[in-house]
């Protein structure tokens, strides 16, 4: 077991957990739900990888994780976010990072976006209702647009239904960073 690295996550419908488990599997390290992470054992790790799902532009659990990581300054915090946004939407993803990380953190905290998907079946009822309302409003907005782009049309096709964009290949850049850090240690 690799005791230098800990992967923890906060998600609801399983996409973030899946990515966290893929990373932990590849690195041979422990994986934990954020709710089970106590601050004291964290100081023994040299790298803490945190994955949070995107909710209305925020990364779920990131504030809590930042506070926990602040108590172990020797550990490197690495963040990944999982959302329904396709990985090709670079501008949207960049805006989300700017909303969740300070300018200093954007430089010092390695961060990665991993496309998840939508699972209406696994969403709690209140979130399903929010998503359905959001989908209805954005569909109406897109339909009114005069010059619809291919990505607008793709959005219309997908937003009301469950879909899965998760792919193990998306963890490669994060794994590569972890392996480089291990070689240097
Ligand atoms: C209420 C709500 C708000 C969401 N907001 C965003 C968002 O701002 N950006 C995004 O990319 N995905 C958003 N999503 C989609 C989730 O981030 C996506 O389904 C993700 O894969 C869920 O991860 P999980 O399976 O670990 O819970 C939202 C989902 C819900 C239910």
Image (spheres, rainbow, N blue to C red):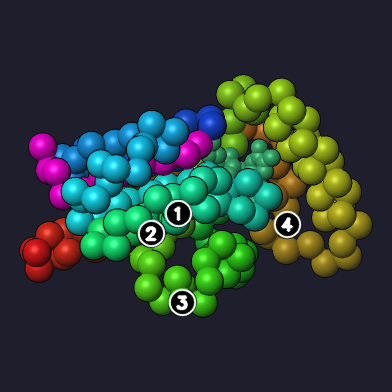
Please identify, in this view, whether the residue under mark 4 or under mark 3 is nearer the observer. Answer: 3
Which one is in front in this view, the residue at disc 3 or the one at disc 1? Answer: 1
Name which of mark 3 and mark 2 comes first in the sequence: 2
Q: Which residue is mark 4?
A: 152
Please give left or right for residue 52 compared with residue 42 in the image: right
20 vs 36, nearest the viewer: 36
Q: Which residue is mark 1?
A: 67
Q: Main secondary structure of the magenta part?
A: strand
Residue beneath disc 2 = 70
Q: Secondary structure at mark 2?
A: helix
Q: Nearer the viewer, residue 86 or 59?
A: 59
Q: Measure the alpha-carbon separation of dots 1 and 2.
A: 5 Å
Say if mark 1 contacts mark 2, CB within 8 Å. yes
Q: Position of residue 38 (x, y in %)?
A: 35, 38
Q: Residue 104: say if magenta.
A: no
Mark 4 neighbour class, 10 Å CA radius: few under 14, some 14 to 19, many 20 or more:
some
Comes first in the chain, label 4 or label 1: 1
C-alpha distance separating marks 3 and 1? 16 Å
SS class, disc 1: helix
Q: Position of residue 87 (x, y in %)?
A: 50, 57
Q: Residue at x 41, y 62 (%)?
A: 111
The magenta segment = 1-11
Q: Pointer 2 and pointer 4: residues touching (CB < 8 Å)?
A: no
SS at mark 4?
Answer: helix
Q: Residue 115: image x %, image y %?
A: 49, 49
Q: In the image, which disc is placed on residue 104? A: 3
Q: Is residue 31 above or below residue 44?
A: above
Q: Can residue 34 be seen in the rendering of this structure?
A: yes
User: Quick one: label 3 or label 1, which is nearer the N terminus?
Assistant: 1
Label 3 vs label 2, nearer the camera: 2
Q: Quadrant of the C terminus?
A: bottom left
């Amino acid at each position: 077991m690799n005791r230098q690295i800990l992967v923890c996550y906060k998600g609801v419908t399983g996409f973030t957990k899946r990515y966290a488990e893929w990373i932990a599997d590849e690195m041979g390290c422990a994986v934990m739900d954020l709710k089970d992470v106590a601050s004291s054992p964290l100081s023994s790790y040299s790298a803490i990888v945190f994955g949070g799902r995107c909710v209305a532009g925020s990364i779920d659990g990131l504030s809590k994780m930042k506070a926990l990581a602040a108590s172990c300054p020797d550990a490197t915090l690495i963040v990944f976010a999982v959302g329904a946004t396709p990985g090709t939407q670079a501008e949207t993803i960049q805006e989300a990072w700017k909303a969740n990380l300070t300018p200093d953190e954007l430089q010092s905290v390695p961060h990665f976006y991993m496309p998840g998907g939508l699972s209406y079946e696994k969403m709690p009822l209140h979130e399903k209702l929010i998503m359905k309302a959001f989908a209805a409003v954005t569909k109406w907005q897109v339909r009114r647009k005069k010059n619809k782009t291919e990505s607008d049309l793709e959005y219309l096709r997908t937003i009301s239904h469950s879909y899965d964009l998760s792919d193990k290949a998306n963890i490669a850049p994060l794994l590569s960073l972890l392996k480089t850090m291990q070689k240097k240690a």
